[in-house]
Each structure stands twice: as C-alpha cells, then as structure tokens.
Amino acid sequence: MGEKAEVLEAVLKETVDLENIPIEEVFENLRCSREGLTSQAAEERLAIFGHNKLEEKKERKFLKFLGFMWNPLSWVMEAAAIMAIALANGGGKPPDWQDFVGIITLLVINSTISFIEENNAGNAAAALMARLAPKAKSALTGESLPVTKGPGDGVYSGSTCKQGEIEAVVIATGVHTFFGKAAHLVDTTNQVGHFQKARRYNCYMFFILNLAHNKSDIERRVHAVIDKFAERGLRSLAVAYQKVPEGRKESAGGPWQFIGLMPLFDPPRHDSAETIRRALNLGVNVKMITGDQLAIGKETGRRLGMGTNMYPSSALLGQDKDESIVALPIDELIEKADGFAGVFPGIGSLVFLANIDRLDMPIISEHKYEIVKRLQARKHICGMTGDGVNDAPALKKADIGIAVADATDAARSASDIVLTEPGLSVIISAVLTSRAIFQRMKNYTIYAVSITIRIVLGFMLLALLWKFDFPPFMVLIIAILNDGLWLLILSIPLHSLSRMHSHM
C-alpha cells in the first residue's frame, strides 16, 4: 500500500511522462488495469489527486465594497473623520460628531457610487459576452478543424468528440490537466514550457525515415521547393495517394506514394496592413508570433509593412541563433525582433507594445506568457490578442488583453477588451480614444492639484490670521461643490458638446 502511494505521488509530481510512454507502462505507473478502478481505489486516488475540478475564486460583494474605502482619497477622508472626533475640540468639549458623521456619510456615498458603477460595468460585459454567437472551435486552441486521434494519442480534458468512440486511461485530472494548467497559469507565475520534448521525437522520426528510405536527394529537392514557396509567402500542401485493396477506407492500405506539392496562399485580412501602418505611426510597435516557416513569416511581415527582422522559435531558448544575434540576451532579442516563426505547436498572434491580427495558426500557454513577461520586464506596456484557453495566461498577464470576436469563454474572461466583430482595426480607435481620456485625466489632475492648494492656503490663512474656526466637513463640501461642475463637464463626450453647440 505504501509503495503504491509513493508511485502515485510520483505521478502527481509529474516525474513520469505518461503522455509518451507505452500504454502498458501507463497501467503499471498508475497501478490500474483495463478493467478500471474499484470504489476503494477511486477513493484512494481522490485523496491523492483531488477532485476533477478547477478551483473557482468567488468574489465577495461586501469585501469588494470595502475595497473602495481603501485608497488614498478614502484615507484622507478617514483621517479627517478621526481628527474630527479626536483633535477638533479641546478644553474638555465633546467630540465633533456632526463632522464625523458627515465625513463618513460622504465616504459611504462615494464608495457606493463606485461599487455600483463597477458592478454595472461587469454585468454589462458578462451580458455582452453571453450574446456573442458561439463558434464551432476548439476551446483549447481556438482552431476550427477537428483532429483525428489514434491508439496512443493524448486526448485533452475539455475536448469534444465529434465522431467515434474511445476507451482511454485518465492520466491527469483537475489542475493537472492541460486545461487546468492554463487556468492556473492565469493567476500564478509558471516556468516556461519545454520545446525539447517535441523536438526530440521529431529527430527520432526523421532518423527512422532516413534509415527506411534512402531518399535524401528527393528530400532536399522537396525542401528546396517548399523554401521557394515560403519565400513568396505560400504554404505547401504535400499530396500523396494510397492503394486500398479491399476497397474500404477502414482497411489497411498500401504505402503512401508522394505525388507532389501544392502551394497555398493564406493572405492576412484586407485591413491588416493599414491597421499595422496606423499602429506604427502612433508609436505602437507590433510583433508577430507565428507557427509558419521563417521565410513565410518574413514575407508576411514584408507584405504587412511590419519588418522582416524575424527569428526562429529556437532563438527564444538560446539555440540555433544567427551569428548576428548570438551575443544578444533573450530579453533584448525579443525586444528588437519583429516576430518569431516556427513557434511550437504552430499558432500565430501579434503582440502590441505600448498582437495585431491573429494569423490562424496553437502555441503553448507558457511560451506566450513568458514573451509577454519579458517584454514587461523591459518596461513596455504590452497588449495581446488571443482566442483559445492556451492564450488566457498571456492575456491575463498583458497590460491589455484583447479577445477576438470568436474567442472562447476562458479567453474572454481573462481579457480586458472583447471584440464583437472580426478584424482588429478597432484597436487603433481604442488607442486614440484612450489617449484622449488620458489627456483629460492629466488636465483634470493639474486643475485639481492647483485648486486644492488654493483651498488649503486660503483656509490656513483664515485660521492663522483671523482665527477663523471652521469644521473639516466644510472643506469637503467646498471641494465637492468646486469639483462637481468640472467632473460633469469632463464626463460629457466631445461629440455631444459639438452637437449641443450646433443647435444653439
């Protein structure tokens, strides 16, 4: 019993690669059989691995309301309330409860308004997300095409079976699944994932093929054609045929015979180039992360006008780097690059520094997360687009997470902005609007600081020179009346003011 528990603990710590070992070894490591588990064994595993669910953080409304009383402005009002009952009166006079109650009332009113506004904004966002039309896409990667699974292949929790039946061994539950790890990474920092595992098996397969078929010359010619297509921004589709003697697709057929290559052109959206041009003119740097070949990535970057300074994904690990960048640290390389190509397992997106169109290609969540984290470490304000669960950690980490129109619920929840229509040209409008808002906030801050200095100096002179006794509550009332009109004016959109002026 103790040995069995130790083995299961090793599985829990993921010291055994259950995804890539033979099925019999999986049974041996999990101490189970093809017949399944007994009730007692299931109880034992629940005690070790926990229930098959993701822990959900529940927001307490009361604590959220109290949070609006914990900020610099509230601290000043709270200090004034304390002073009203502790220091306002001397000579044995009773505390000034009127000022205390007045200040606390203003504090509660201010917090209540803030709480209601934020709560309404959250409800509006949830309602908007619920109205968005669902798409037939994978929740994990956002891809629309199904994937055929055979014996020995892994099946992810959260996937939907489109056709067929399957018997499988559960090797992970809850937060230990791919879905769970992505959700966990949204809230916590994690180590970057490993490219090496997939690359190792690719090398084995390549070596075995060479031993079985001595066709290195044909392979070189095929790759030369693929590279030529890639330099023109074309993807390559290999075409082959197979003879099936029995005439049924389920029966075992003969070896596949390679026929040739078919070029495919998958152009970016019609407005992508203009969107990127406007972004660059606004001082927003754009980086592309794609699963395509390096040559395709460079050609796409050239067509979009975002530069061709792109590198293979291996450069992210400090491997196979070009001589011109061999001395560059990874952080500096990511900052200077226009993008990265061949990112495993092959999904594309663009990252805004201050992702434009996603190029319909999944990348492991830790990799995007790490890229965003390193850019932020270089003091960049980073925005990113995404649509799948694997994008959620990076969307949450980015300063501005942007979920595209057909994104999954996980990506929408982790994002700050949810697009309701295809295309990302609206992001440029958002940049312009946000800069206008920031300028308004800056102007108001300058005004508020100057008017506060005037009020403080005025009342200080009244108190020192004329011995004028005034309660703290009166200062707050004057400040509110003084700021209220300006806040009302600043809250009215400029186009509304223009419309009012045109009707006068």
Image (spheres, grey):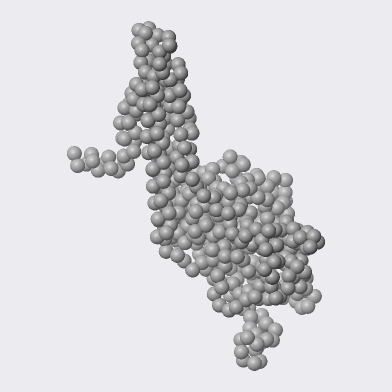
Q: What residue appears at the point 45 percent right and 29 percent down from the top-left corner?
A: 73
> In screen coordinates, is 130 left or right of 331?
left
Task: In this rendered view, identify the residue nearer to me: 41 or 310.
Answer: 41
Q: Position of residue 287 (x, y in %)?
A: 56, 51
Q: Position of residue 132 (x, y in %)?
A: 42, 60
Would you say residue 432 is visible in this rendering? Answer: no
Q: What residue appears at the point 43 percent right and 11 percent down from the top-left corner?
A: 92
The part of the image, by quadrant, that contains residue 348 is bottom right
Q: Quadrant of the C terminus?
A: top left
Task: In this rendered view, identify the residue nearer to me: 111 or 282.
Answer: 111
Q: What residue appears at the point 48 percent right and 49 percent down from the top-left corner?
A: 416
Q: Position of residue 106 (x, y in %)?
A: 37, 30
Vertical side of 486 occupied by 318: above or below: below
> In screen coordinates, is 302 left or right of 103?
right
Vertical side of 439 occupied by 136: above or below: below
- Residue furthest to the left in view is 504
Q: Position of residue 367 (x, y in %)?
A: 63, 54
Q: What residue appears at the point 42 percent right and 32 percent down from the top-left corner?
A: 442
> In screen coordinates, is 407 left or right of 213?
left
The part of the image, by quadrant, that contains residue 10 is bottom right
Would you say residue 173 is visible in this rendering? Answer: yes
